[in-house]
Amino acid sequence: MIGALEAGGTKMICAVLQQDGTVADKLTLPTRTPAQTMPPMIEFFVKHKVEALGIGCFGPLDLDEASPTFGFITATPKLDWRFYDIVGEFKKALGVPVVMDTDVNCAALGEACFGSCKGLQDCVYITVGTGIGMGVLVNGKLVHGIQHPELGHIPVAPMAGDDYAGHCPYHGRCLEGMAAGPAMRERWGAPAQELNDRPEVWQLEAEYLAQGIMTCILAYAPRRIVLGGGVLHNPTLLPLVRSAVQRLLGGYVACPAVQKLEEYIVAPALGDAQALLGCMQLVRQ
């Protein structure tokens, strides 16, 4: 039995998976402070006697094994979790191997192994929700350098007439600061799910997401891009994003895959299970 933890900024999803990926049990908790959130998660995994634990976590994370803070959540905007040794605490409590990557990297791995990118060595998973993150798989391996990619914080050019200052406490008008769920709520005065009947909301959202996707295409040349997260529950957004990406690229990327954006920028194939399955695959690797 393999433990999987999708540690998100809003909620924690704990699961126990059998070797074939079947979920044997699941526990969902709101993300509060470590003192409130860790004990019930530890209890869940101890109860199921997991043999290993894979964690897909909100970041930034320290994934450098040579670093003194390896396995820590680092400079996160979630202040209660800043520089928290999440891997170390689970290792100490469970006494089993614990591996971790970002939640979006795990989602990318899940889609690459079991979902819409199965069989592809190069793909990107983008989630748009409480934050914006991009998980990057190149030559079949998740990308790490001095840390993991943080493409949610790339600068974006403000659209004409948009004087919104941005929600990100670090960068203001970065992609996440302009297009994540909290930015939408602050700019428009309501959460994304209550704005479905306002086309101007989704056109603006598509324009900012398209800037991020264009950067991603030019930087990594992925063979497919998966676009997920709570904000994508509006069915009009994905077609608007494809149209905006096509316009921004201006014909510069002429390979056949990018000529069929409905097959190149796609929705997740695994519902909400891609990160948990990615955590399982992380343990296997």
Image (tube, rainbow, N blue to C red):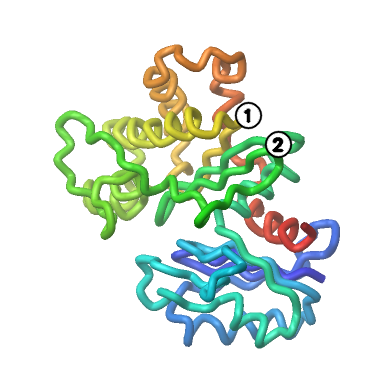
Residue 106, x across and y down, in percent: 63, 54
**Of residues 75 and 204, the one drawn nearer to the viewer in this rendering:** 75
Quick one: label 2 or label 1, which is nearer the N terminus? 2
Q: Residue drawn at (66%, 87%), measured in percent from left and top?
A: 93
Q: Residue drawn at (57%, 38%), measured in percent from left and top?
A: 226
Pointers 2 and 1 in contact (C-beta within 8 Å): yes
Q: Residue drawn at (57%, 39%), measured in percent from left and top?
A: 124
Residue 229, x across and y down, in percent: 50, 48
Q: Label 2 vs label 1: CA separation?
A: 8 Å
**Of residues 184 and 198, the one drawn nearer to the viewer in this rendering:** 184
**Secondary structure beneath disc 2?**
loop
Give the amino acid at mark 1: Arg
Side (left or right) of 58 relative to 277:
left
Q: Please name the residue that numbered disc 2 is placed on.
A: 121
- As drawn, the label of residue 223 is 1
Looking at the image, is 248 positioned above or below residue 172?
Answer: above
